[in-house]
Amino acid sequence: MSVLLEAIFARADQDGDRIALDDGSRRLLYRDLPCAVAAMAGMIGDAIPGPGPVAIERDNGIDWVIADLALLSLGRPNIPLPPFFMPAQRAAALADAGAAGSITGMGMVLFDHPVAAIPAGTAKISYTSGSTGEPKGICLDDRLMLDTAQAIVARLGDGLADVHFPVLPLAVLLENVAGLYATLLAGGRYLVRPAAAVGLTNPFAINDAQLVAAIDASHATSLILVPEYLARIVDHLERTRNRLDKLRLVAVGGSRVPLSLIERADRIGLPVVQGYGLTECGSVVSLEALGDRNRGTVGHPLNHASVSLASDGEIVVAGHFHLGTIGHPRADGPIHTGDIGTVDEQGRLSIVGRKSSLIITSFGRNVAPEWVEAQLVAQPQIAQAMVYGDGESRLRALIVPSARDADIAAGVAAANATLPAYARIGLWQPSRPFTPADATLTPNGRLRRAAILARLEVRPFFDRLCAETAPARARLLSVPQLQAGLAGRISRTTYLAYLAQAYHHVSHTVPLMRLARSGLAAKPMLVEALDDYIAEEEGHEQWILNDIRAAGGDTDAVVRDGPSSATARMVDHAYATLRDGNPAAFFGMVFVLEGTSIALASNGAEAVRASLGLPETAFTYLTSHGALDQDHMRFFEKLVNGLDDVADEDAIVAMANDIFDLFGGLFAAIPMEDDRAAA
């Protein structure tokens, strides 16, 4: 008989009257387990004869557990298939393993697959999706699963095995071994519910209110979660001020957990421990103990595993582990995990990132993207993030917002505040979600980086410029003075104050163009464009002075008083950037100023004129720039889409973001004290 099953049945002799399995309406005592398993084994043998492997394709429940144990008793490999596998993944896994049949919610199904070369001793074939989306079957024996589960019990203690509430699918090895087997070996109650009953009908679209309510109603004392589930539970508890006071253990694994998320969980009383593991090692390799936690680590290695670091920081695990994959048996030997880690003086392991995804910036700094991503998704505005930018000066990120109106910029800023300068996000853009359905996410929630980057459409630079400056543009448009101007709700005093600052920055437009032109002599396309702009813009500051006179203002005072400090900052930044940086950045300033002029001309000028009763001659600068800058913007789009230098593109994006914020500061500095009376 299976050594794992023997150990579980030993509990039937010791604690026969205790409840082993509970689904809310049906309970099975430990002493009843052997009979239930024998009955299921008989049914499997009759319906799916022969020695071939059998899949389990059922929802979480008592029958899933009994089928799993029955296959152990029969010595037949079990293929637990996660409910989130796509049809093609499911079919590939069944064919790869040569499945003889499957146990489903509707009964048992026979298959006619060719016999596969399964390593001797295989008890479970755990399929991971692999980096290309093709399932890879890891073959495990019952000794490894027993060793792993016993090591978990030894680390946490029998006393914590009271009521375990599975949230992850049982087909996920982490829950199967660390949840089910460890609970049964410790004599606890495994309180299993179908996914729909716990808010996980779609495991990637969590009903957090239902999940928290189900945990609370179950009186669960232990959970195993992936970081996303922990984040959703923490978010819900913070919002509602509810608490899950009966929990004594919340083990989190599957991917790196942001330290800030753990700290938030601590503050609301969730007893979180971190773990680390691999399917190849039976699921869990290291785990914190409740009395020995050092936030940011994943604890000491378990008894069945020995951990060391290679010269490049790669984590290497030694012990009795997986038997190989289908058709490729493996002898015991060290497993090179591909993960980068560190070990502290007390022997606790920390996970830094993945060796294969390591980013090396143009400054020569190594950055594990998982580290930065963890800080991003710890922010409530951000649901998912992928960081990239190998060889670039600044890191980039694709951001999936947590809600339609989420302030992504604020989330990125908060994450950046927790990171050193070299690891901060310099550029980001919104993204649609990453999911297993489109092969951008593995079934256990890891990013498929190559697939995500491949999904990015090859798009014109102008579209990238619009996308990557959208948050900064939104900040500018949210400035109260600009909103009031667009709505026509400003006083004559405020309008004159705006014209005064417009004069002081527009008077520098042509000098800035000439400075940019002098640095772009080797780029004739940009020089020609600047020549056209210079001819077009010469003397426009005089238009503004004419408007000031027509509106009853004092032009001599405007010239004499000079710019506000906010206007001076914007102009000074432009000069410094063109002198000391890439002069192509000037076109980022063009993008901001002309785009804003279009908005003011089309939405604000006539509304302001009508509300103030001023003549049309007081609005020549705005109204002329409305039509003029629309033509300029069409020309600008064609121009920048013809760029062939990434450094120029990056400089334009950076300058546009800077000027959006500086221009917003210019508007914010305009006084509006008497505007209510004017409105």
Image (cartoon, rainbow, N blue to C red):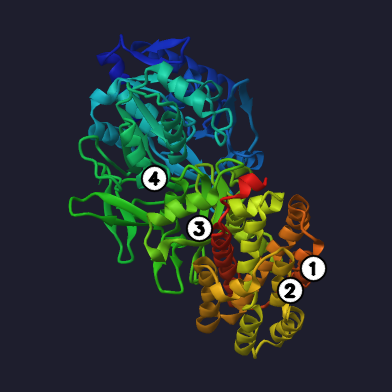
In terms of depth relative to the viewer, which is nearer, 596 or 34?
596
**Residue type (three-letter) at the residue carrying disc 2:** Trp
Measure the C-alpha gap from mark 4 to mark 3: 16 Å
The quadrant in which the N terminus is found is top left
Label placed on residue 543: 2
**Disc 4: which residue:** 257
SS of the residue under disc 2: helix
The quadrant in which the C terminus is found is top right
**Disc 1: which residue:** 624
Within 10 Å of disc 2 (Cα), the crowding (few <14, some 14-19, many 20+) is some
Q: Is residue 45 left or right of residue 10?
A: right
Residue in the picture at 36% in, 38% down: 264
Mark 4 / mark 3, whichever is N-terminal: 4
SS of the residue under disc 3: strand
Q: Are marks 1 and 2 in contact (CB under 8 Å)?
A: yes
**Residue type (three-letter) at the residue carrying disc 3:** Val
Mark 2 / mark 3, whichever is N-terminal: 3
Measure the C-alpha gap from mark 1 to mark 3: 43 Å
